[in-house]
Amino acid sequence: MGSYLRKLLCLTFILVFIAVQVGCGYQAQLEPAAEVDNNENAATTKSIDTTIDDDISSENESSVVEDKLKIGYSMASGVGPWYEDLRISIIEAAEQYQIELNVFDAGSSITTACDDIRKMISEEYDVIGVLPISIEEYNEVLTEAEQAGITVIMFDRPVSEESLYDAIIASDFYHQGELAAQWLIAKKVEIGLTSEPKSTSVAVLHGGFDRGFVQSDKRYQGFADTLAADNSFVINELLNGEYYNEYAQTAVAELLSQGESVDVIYACNDSMAIGAVTAIEAAGLTAGQDIIVIGVDATLEAIELIESGKMNCTVESEPRLGDLFIEYVIKSTAGEKTMRELYPQEEAIDASNLESADIWSQ
């Protein structure tokens, strides 16, 4: 029996086993986020609850695959703990299914990342997961992976040529911006803002304009598009925070030193929001009261600032994507129809729902 056939039979056994367990109480919910096409061959988008029942997790740990799939994960070392939690999530999910996984950390070097992927191609990996450093520099190496018949799954953001990957597992960054704006509109009276036309001045901390930062671009666009429905808000300032606390702190400090009126600061990640809080406090103002502060990511430090009242809201950006990754790998390798775009469920978090929110560990 060929190696591929043995893999296929073993994976089919696993899927049947999991299906039986689902009938016995696996509670994860799959809800459509968007209908893409009624054609059964069309790519489909799903919004997915990543919570895995403890019972099914323990059963998965005992699953044994005779011929293990060989999976590689090429990652970029990014800003903040999100990237490390994603790495841990992928490793733990692979261990549960006893699937061989090798992690390659390229840091911030595109050359290293491409070399790592070529190494995996030469060693005939079955699947390669990629967290790209940029969206433009991977087309050549992913073309090589495609020619070798290797499944490629993107994390967090796509590359520019969509035909070069089989699936993407990521947050819906535009929707994260929508959630931030929806929270602001719904809470404006409660947090002391008025409904008078153009009465509320908003500053946005972006990660870097014209830099190809998909997350920041879409988080800003979703926020701006949604906020435009309420004429009491005006985005007067677009600040470059470079995604880092220190850069954001400097940008906000300069803005406040000019005597500009700012009622709300929306930062496209929590690191920049935290920098804004520091600058606001240094200017003798009270963050969370004199200036409303909203971030994205739901990092531990942001949650602590919400608890202390110095930040008002953060929007989740779920890094626990390992189960979605391994589930996709098993189903696609066994020939099952799979979704091409997988988005985890996320929500806006403030003081009112801190205790009930499923916040990712850091």
Image (cartoon, helix red, strand yellow):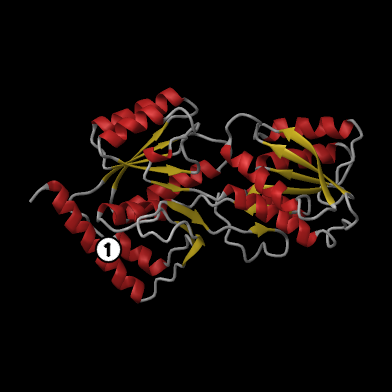
Whether residue 270 is visible here, answered yes or no, is no
From this view, report whether residue 315 is shown above or below residue 20. above
Query: Residue 45 or 243: which is nearer the viewer?
Result: 45
| Disc 1 secondary structure class | helix
Residue 194 x, y percent position in the rendering: 89, 57
Residue 132 x, y percent position in the rendering: 46, 35
The structure residue drawn at horizontal position 61% and vertical position 48%, both measured from the top left corner, is 174
Query: Residue 235 or 273: which is nearer the viewer?
Result: 235
Relative to residue 206, is residue 212 drawn left or right? left
Residue wearing tag 1? 15
The structure residue drawn at horizontal position 27% and vertical position 61%, both measured from the top left corner, is 62
From this view, report whether residue 222 is shown above or below residue 138. below
**Label 1: how many residues lie within 10 Å, few (<14), some (14-19) or many (20+)?**
some
Relative to residue 249, is residue 38 drawn left or right? left
**Residue 257 in which image quadrant:** top right
From this view, report whether residue 147 is shown above or below residue 359. above
